[in-house]
Amino acid sequence: MADTKKGREKQARDAETRQQERDVAEFRERADEPEPEPPRADEEAEEAEAADEGESPRTCHRRGCEEPAAFVVLERYQEDTGHGAVEAEAFLCREHTEEESPVNLDGVYEEYVFRVEPLRSSV
């Protein structure tokens, strides 16, 4: 196709149509998945109590993972607006910790932190 305004507009429309088709296909694939069960009130209370006592949660933070948390992953980065630091902390099992990597590298600043630390065993 010639590099004209009309040709570029058609390419853009075609790309948008393809993206919409991919989004619909992805939605249809996920429509068969069961909704995750909301945490029970007693589990939330136990986790909040454990956090208050300085203990880690008992299970991995990843949705659908029931493995015990083995590591805490901390990332501190500059907020998008540039008006302060954000700390993201996740308690993860061994398998999900291996998959973890820095996410907010565009928010790196002098006090940026990405740290993975093992949790103390409560056994």
Image (cartoon, grey):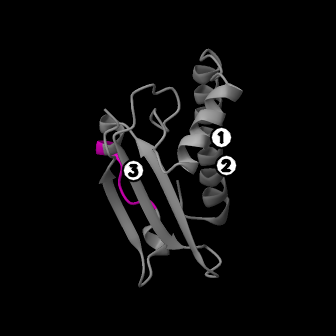
Residue topped by disc 3: 72
**Quadrant of residue 74 within the rendered picture:** bottom left
View extreme (bottom): residue: 110
**Quadrant of residue 66 within the rendered picture:** top left
Residue at the spot 64% in from the left edge and 34% down from the top edge: 44
CA gap, disc 3 and disc 1: 41 Å
Q: Earlier in the sequence, mark 3 or mark 1?
A: 1
CA gap, disc 3 and disc 2: 45 Å
Secondary structure of the residue carrying tag 2 is: helix
CA gap, disc 2 and disc 1: 6 Å
* 62 and 7: which is toward the camera: 62
Apparent side of residue 91 relative to residue 63 in the rendered image (left or right): left
Looking at the image, residue 89 lies above or below residue 34: below
Closer mark to the observer between disc 3 and disc 1? 3
Give the x, y percent position of residue 32: 62, 14
Task: Please tell me whether residue 101 belongs to the stretch shown in magenta.
Answer: yes
Give the x, y percent position of residue 34: 62, 16
Residue topped by disc 2: 13
Q: Which residues are magenta?
A: 98-103
Secondary structure of the residue carrying tag 1 is: helix
Q: Residues within 10 Å of mark 2 (few under 14, many from 20)?
A: few
* 52 and 15: which is toward the camera: 52
Residue at the spot 46% in from the left edge and 45% down from the top edge: 55
**Quadrant of residue 103 within the rendered picture:** bottom left
Q: Name the amino acid type tagged 2.
A: Arg
**Residues at marks 2 and 1 touching, judged by CB atoms closer than 8 Å:** yes
Q: Residues within 10 Å of mark 3 (few under 14, many from 20)?
A: many
Residue topped by disc 1: 17
Can residue 39 be seen from the camera position used here? no
* 39 and 55: which is toward the camera: 55
